Image: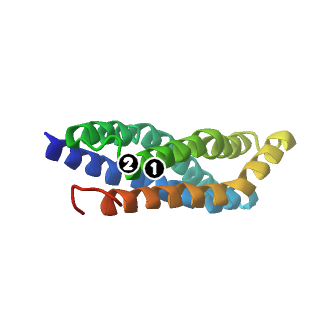
């Protein structure tokens, strides 16, 4: 059972976290282009790309909840729930989820709201504020996941082998 859970955990990580990592990284550039383009065709294309990246972020972030759930099941099956590397991974995953919930999704939503109300100065101000933080937040989000992957592979202090 542990091998099946581990396989599903890794598969979910690749299929669900990977797209989120790419989408949150690409969003700020596309969003800035969508907000600053003045020609109709290019503006519409950038706006469509921005909306698509936001949708990918939302959908795959929800699907990504399967990763820690399968991870807990895997850890229980492997009897490693109390191992420090796993606890550290759980904490880092929680921090990444908090970044997504508190900064990434609201920042992206502010941009989408601004695109939906092109003449609204208040929406544009919110979008600009959100866009200032998004590249850094995306980088930290992706770095946290990279550290979690390394911890999962190396498993420092584990007696189950690496």
Is 99 situated above or below 33? above
Residue 18 pos. (x, y %): 40, 55
The image's mark for residue 88 is 1
The residue at the point 75 percent across, 47 percent down is 127
| 54 or 60: nearer the viewer | 60
The residue at the point 68 percent across, 45 percent down is 107
Q: Is residue 15 left or right of residue 56?
A: left
Question: How much space separates mark 1 and mark 2, taking CA atoms?
Answer: 5 Å
The image's mark for residue 6 is none
> Can residue 40 be seen in the rendering of this structure?
no
Is 33 situated above or below 50? below
**Other residues around mark 1 within 10 Å, as few (<14) / some (14–19) / many (≥20):** some
The image's mark for residue 86 is 2
Residue 45 pos. (x, y %): 58, 57
Residue 63 pos. (x, y %): 39, 39
Q: Check the picture and name the quadrant holding the N terminus.
A: top left
- Element type at mark 1: helix
- Element type at mark 2: helix
Residue 82 pos. (x, y %): 35, 42
The residue at the point 34 percent across, 50 percent down is 13
Q: How is the image coloured?
A: rainbow
Q: Check the picture and name the quadrant holding the C terminus.
A: bottom left
Number of marks present in the image shown: 2
| 9 or 76: nearer the viewer | 76
The residue at the point 44 percent across, 37 percent down is 62
**Other residues around mark 2 within 10 Å, as few (<14) / some (14–19) / many (≥20):** many
Is 76 situated above or below 131? above
Badge 1 vs badge 2, beta-carbon distance below 8 Å: yes
| 22 or 73: nearer the viewer | 73
> Can residue 31 be seen in the rendering of this structure?
yes
Res. 141 image quadrant: bottom right
């Amino acid at each position: 059972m542990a091998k099946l859970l581990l396989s599903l955990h890794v598969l979910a990580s690749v299929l669900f976290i990977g797209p989120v990592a790419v989408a949150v990284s690409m969003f700020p550039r596309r969003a800035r282009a969508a907000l600053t383009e003045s020609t109709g065709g290019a503006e519409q294309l950038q706006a469509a790309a921005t909306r698509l990246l936001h949708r990918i972020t939302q959908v795959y972030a929800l699907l990504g909840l399967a990763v820690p759930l399968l991870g807990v099941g895997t850890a229980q099956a492997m009897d490693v729930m109390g191992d420090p590397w796993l606890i550290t991974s759980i904490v880092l995953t929680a921090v990444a989820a908090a970044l997504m919930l508190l900064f990434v999704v609201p920042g992206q939503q502010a941009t989408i709201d601004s695109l939906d109300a092109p003449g609204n100065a208040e929406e544009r101000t919110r979008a600009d504020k959100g866009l200032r933080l998004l590249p850094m937040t995306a980088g930290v989000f992706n770095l946290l996941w990279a550290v979690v992957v390394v911890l999962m592979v190396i498993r420092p202090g584990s007696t189950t082998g690496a």
